[in-house]
Amino acid sequence: MPQSKHLHLTAFMRPVSLHTGAWRYEGAYADANFNLEHLQTFIRKLEAAKFDAFFMADHLGVLNMPVEALRRSQTVTSFEPFTLLAALSAVTSRIGLAATASTTYEEPYHVARRFASLDHLSGGRAAWNIVTTGNPESSRNFGRDEHLEHSERYKRAREFYDVVTGLWDSFADDAFIRDQRTGIFFDPDKMHVLDHRGPSLSVRGPLNIARPVQGWPVIVQAGQSEPGRQLAAETAEVVFCSPSDLAAAKTLYADIKGRAVTAGRNPSHLSILPAALIIVGDTVDEAKAKRQKLDSLVHYESAIASLSVALGTDASGFDPDGPLPTDLPETNASKTSRAGVLKVAKEEKLTVRQLAQRYGGYAGLAFVGTPETIADEMARWLAEEGADGFTVVFPFVPQGLDDVTERLVPELQRRDLFRRDYEGKTLREHLGLPRPENRFFQ
């Protein structure tokens, strides 16, 4: 019997892997973040596998971490997202192109213009990942000594969204006549001057570019805090999130979808796509061995700091090759975080060193197994409303990406869990989203 619902899959590609040890894995491309030829190959493979989108996170500065850890990080250098995606749009024709742009350190006119341009260049494949930028160090790259307070960042983000989408609606779809005989290029009656004046922003408009092919580029939102969930419910069409397990995912899913209904939106027009590290093996044990090898490439001196944060106590004095002590002191740290560490340590029988390397490498949701066992898990998440699909994190490239596109995707297609071909030409069509009406011209 055919599936009534298919998974959506996006590929997390900046950095090309979130795992700290990815660039050191045997056969991995150490320069993958900053090599256009490699990135062109990756996106072509993802498009051949019918992925919904190529997703680029962004950082507005070098990550705020100790130099000992920073010097081992692949995130230090990578392309600016719009420049890269414009280049990649020329070698692809269907896959979506999602870029992050900050509402805290960008201006709405710049963001609206860049995404409208990318949407036209790509034939309707752009998506804007709205972030408020949580790294306080970024403020110093933009002439500010202090970071905006959390709630203020989200208030600005909500207003920012209204301004950007208003600017995309500056012209009616048929405003540009381009009549060479009469000399009339566009109809002024089909141009709207936004003239926005709000608490945080003042933008006159109109945008000096035609309305995007998709009407509006697809809206992506990343954030799980209270204001983040509300912003997602009111504005997002894709939610990038990081629940720890299926139970947490189901709670998040129901909460955001419920808020969307309260906001008067159709919940089916909002896809929730948790990030998931995917490691494929011929057997489950082989996949687990790949994971352990990958984790082992995380330097212990950097990793132990991550474990200490997760436990809420200094772990540097623990025996690296012994089990995690059971008599940990009480702290004010997150009980959920600590419980997660204890659960992993017990279930996988990991030493302190292995735990530290896990938390220093990638501690998020992971599917580690054969194509069949991973497909089973994904099907369960879809059926139990923990996700509408996944934002795939590759353990290393190129092999980790090839394992997903050449082994997992065919298994999902065999089960009718994933498309065999694209539904249309635009990202909105891939995601089953309507084209927004112009708020100023019906």
Image (cartoon, rainbow, N blue to C red):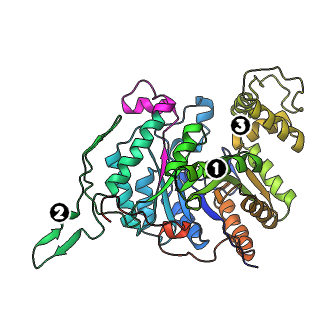
Q: CA distance from mark 1 to mark 2?
A: 54 Å
Cβ atoms at labels 1 and 3 below 8 Å apart: no
Against 174, residue 395 (above or below) is above
In the rendering, at what x and y percent does residue 407 appear?
A: 73, 69
- Whether residue 113 can be seen here: no
Q: Which of the pair 371/401 is nearer the observer?
A: 371
Q: Which residue is mark 1?
A: 23
Q: State the mark number for residue 188.
A: 2
In the rendering, at what x and y percent does residue 34 appear?
A: 50, 52
Q: Residues within 10 Å of mark 3 (few under 14, many from 20)?
A: some
Is label 3 or label 2 in front?
A: 2
In the rendering, at what x and y percent does residue 96 appear?
A: 50, 64
Q: Is residue 151 magenta?
A: yes
- Looking at the rendered structure, the secondary structure element under dot 1 is helix
Q: Left of 55 or right of it: where is 159?
A: left
Q: Which residue is mark 3?
A: 299
Identify the mark nearer the N-term, 1 or 2: 1
Q: Give the extent of the magenta segment.
A: 128-152
Identify the mark nearer the N-term, 3 or 2: 2
Against 250, residue 176 (above or below) is below
Residue at screen point 63% across, 77% down = 420
Q: Left of 338 or right of it: where is 30?
A: left
Q: Is residue 75 magenta?
A: no
- Looking at the rendered structure, the secondary structure element under dot 3 is loop
Which residue ends up furthest to the left in the rendered image? 182
The residue type indicated by label 3 comes to His
Identify the mark nearer the N-term, 1 or 3: 1
